[in-house]
Amino acid sequence: MNPDLALLHPYPFEKLVELQQGCQPPSDLPHISLSIGEPKHPTPGFITEAVISHLHGLSVYPTTAGSIELRHTIANWLDQRFQLAGHIDPLSQVLPVNGTREALFAFAQAIIDRRKDPLIVMPNPFYQIYEGAAFLAGAEPYLLNCTEETGFVPDFDAVPASVWSRCQLLYLCSPGNPTGAIVDAETLTKLIQLAHEYDFIIAADECYSEIYFDEALPPVGLLQAAVAAGYNDLSRCVVFHSLSKRSNAPGLRSGFVAGDANVMKSFLRYRTYHGCAMPPSTQSASIAAWTDEAHVAHNRHLYREKFAAVLDILSPVMNVIQPEASFYLWAETPIADTDFARGLFDQYNVTVLPGRFLARDTKQGNPGVNRIRMALVAPQDECVEAAMRIRDYIETLS
């Protein structure tokens, strides 16, 4: 077996199951889960119908590169959403993928040169796929703590030149999971300059970019910052997007990767051997989803209502604020995060994810300790009921 498999940590939800062993939550309280970031709003009917009406595509092999129509649709969406002024070529700079998770993992396998003592720089806490991708690509993860003091984004100015010189790949998550923090345009521009100076690639996970609270201020994207700074070829910049969160279609397994044409050419070659082409019916449904914004705006409206209602209940009793984007609350706990999560489940039948399960220990500490991630993905009445139970639980601790 590949010895690097032994480096992989148990997934956060495996740790959560272990934490809950021996608990006996009250049977008269229905279970409410805020632990998994799986969208629960209904998938728009037109997406479902597009899948059904194109099932005849089952009779043909799809190409790894995806249909020309889908790539044009994605390029048009990117151009309009991120003000790219036409600096995106659908044929050489866009590649459909089966969700961002598999693409984020596979990207490191294609990019990293393990002969050169590589580092992959990533935020801490993080989406655990980044770390697993690093280990299996033969790279060392370099963690940048995201704390309240840093605005929940990495302090890139504190990274020494010796780290950048070994860095081959930077995983960027904006809006962040679990923090919901956004990396601003000025910082993105600095990172692009560093990527050119030190010869590394930026992989920007932007799958939460369409869940934000101010319709006039959508989160800035990496390609947007690149074009604004004059990097019209998008060199060293690659973004990852998905329909799972944007369109409430996690089971569709549809997203895309876009950016630097030279990088995309190599990634396409890797994926040709990897064998991960998107089914034709999924491609047709994806075209329908990327060309409609009404359902996305409605989705944001539902999240705004939920966040307002939940924060009205929780803000008076715990340190928690509305994130800049995403559907997570990253709240501070009055006791150890693991004790809090276990007690809440045992006494009130509500599941949240301890922050330390999403982070790693560093010399500067573990930025997930004494925090919990709450995914406000359930219907509003469930989220409000969960918030009231959390409030009641906190009051028993004082």
Image (cartoon, helix red, strand yellow):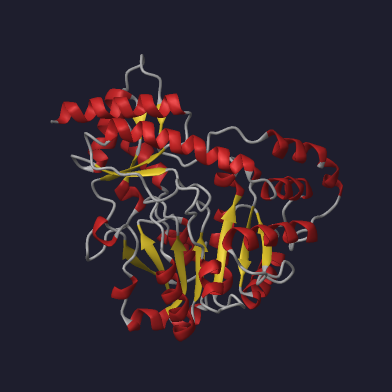
* Residue 20 location, quadrant: top left
Q: Is residue 41 above or below residue 162?
A: above
Residue visible at 27% across and 46% down in the picture: 371
Residue visible at 67% across and 50% down in the picture: 290
Residue 292 lies left or right of residue 362; in this view the side is: right
Viewer can see residue 146: yes
How many badges with numbers are in the image?
Answer: 0
Q: Is residue 23 above or below residue 339?
A: above
Q: Is residue 199 above or below residue 225?
A: below
Q: Position of residue 358 (x, y in %)?
A: 36, 51
Residue 104 lies left or right of residue 144; in this view the side is: right
Residue 5 lies left or right of residue 254; in this view the side is: left
* Residue 89 location, quadrant: bottom right
Q: Position of residue 63 (x, y in %)?
A: 78, 60
Q: Position of residue 56 (x, y in %)?
A: 86, 42
Viewer can see residue 249: no
Q: Position of residue 71 (x, y in %)?
A: 73, 60
Front residue (pair 26, 211): 211
